[in-house]
Amino acid sequence: MIKSTIAELPKNVDKEVKIGAWIANKRSSGKIAFLQLRDGTGFVQGVVVKSEVGEELFQTAKSLTQESSVYVTGLVQKDERSPFGYELLVKGVQLIHSSVDYPITPKEHGTEFLMDNRHLWLRSKRQHAVMKVRNEIIRATYEFFNENGFTKVDPPILTGSAPEGTTELFATKYFDEDAYLSQSGQLYMEAAAMALGKVFSFGPTFRAEKSKTRRHLIEFWMIEPEMAFVEFEDNLVVQEEYVSFIVQSVLKNCALELKTLGRDTSKLEKIKAPFPRISYDDAVKFLQEKGFDDITWGDDFGAPHETAIAESYDKPVFITHYPTTLKPFYMQPDPNREDVVLCADLIAPEGYGEIIGGSERIHDMDLLEKRVEEHQLDTETYKWYLELRKYGSVPHSGFGLGLERTVAWISGVEHVRETIPFPRLLNRLYP
Ligand code: 4AD
Ligand code: MG
């Protein structure tokens, strides 16, 4: 008997295998039972025919409850009608553990109920598909950056500094000192870029944002590349190539999951570099022409504005050169214009909003010191960061891609709460 997983079944067509599985769902009539089996690697239908297995085994199969665990033996068969393409003609069933009153039934449930049961909800076919897409994006991220000469560097999570402003920090005690959970590894990645040239990080970040939207998490994961000797324009090229690479990787390696999610893949097929660019100035004009009378030059864009801009394109769009006043202290001013910075936000199509924030960084010591003062930051805390401009300062740029928003867009799921195993949301720390 071959021990197999569901994902390995295609290698074992016309052979008898044994799999460990859970009963995701079940249908039966007097003569035949259909077991929806899942084992974490995939989903397959097990067909139990009474006339072939006999009365006793057929009754065992019929009485299996949702999420009971079993060992199943059976013959692997091609099945053109199923999305997976294979089914298992069941020969034997051995009950491991009987599950009683599983709360998530095949009927519709409300969001809060599902969120309270997130530890179980993760088992559903849809959540399984989203986690697989998430994993593929992470895998493709490592492939992309390793293939392109980047070194992975891990910035600290407990920090003394706040790159993205001080209002959204999670404070904690570090023995007698005050510390914060990282909201971005960027400042440390800048130091790493001066040591290793091209670097990237992938880790959790924390923001005590009071926003309750479909795009905001309190704890989210960010991919942060940083590159020495790379200026504004070249930074955008890396971003569009990276984003194209992860989308095309998901299309190639998660076809079944995208089908499960009902994703319109024709939209994803178009996601290839280069991406369009629009300046903040032109974006403001565009919005005003569209009738957004709440926007004047100097205002930040909200979700409706980003969505309106993104709707003009079938690829992600860079909004570049935002007003200096809207952005963090470290961004390099445009050499031709003091009032805007060399930055870009990348806005995903289909209303998914900003997935990347990036910029060229200030490399002039005097200007950076001035900015630290203007932003009323503690010079002692930023002493090490300023020193990067003292010893062989070079132009450098980087960006941060929010993993969960990217997963939401590529999977086509509405809300970021479904894109991370255990979401931390405003008012939710359970489970
Ligand atoms: O635009 P942000 O704030 O940029 C930075 O943190 C830079 N220091 C990154 C860098 O240049 N190294 O955040 C980057 C991305 C956003 O574009 C968004 O995708 C995601 O992080 N993000 C969030 N995702 C989920 N929930 C939140 N509350 C998020 N805040 C930001
Ligand atoms: Mg941003």
Image (cartoon, rainbow, N blue to C red):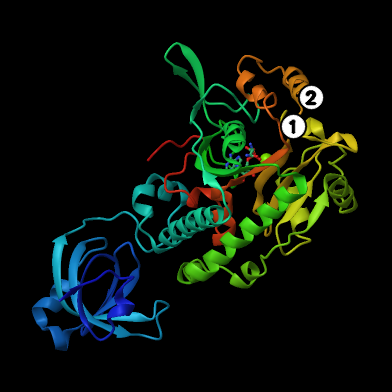
Residue type for callout 1: Ile
* Residue 63 appears in the rendering: no
Give me the residue at 35% from left, 67% from top: 42
| Residue at disc 2, CB closer than 8 Å to ligand 1 | no
Ligand 1: quadrant of the figure? top right
Residue 347, compared with residue 430, is above or below; it is below
Q: In which quadrant will I find the C terminus? A: top left
Label 1 with label 2: CB-CB less than 8 Å:
yes
Outermost residue, front side = 392
Image location (x, y in percent) of residue 421? 42, 48
Outermost residue toward the bottom?
51
Q: What residue is drawn where x is 49% and y is 52%?
A: 419
In this view of the protein, can residue 125 be seen by the observer?
yes
Q: Residues within 10 Å of mark 2 (few under 14, many from 20)?
A: some
Which dot marks residue 367? 2
Q: Position of residue 121 (x, y in %)?
A: 38, 54
Is 311 on the left-hand or right-hand side of 399?
right
Classify mark 1 as within 8 Å of ligand 1 or not, answering yes or no: no
Give the CA distance from mark 1 to mark 2.
Answer: 7 Å
Q: Is 193 left, or right, of 426 in this rendering? A: right
Question: Tag 2: residue type?
Answer: Leu
In the picture, measured across the screen, residue 47 lies left or right of residue 145, that is: left
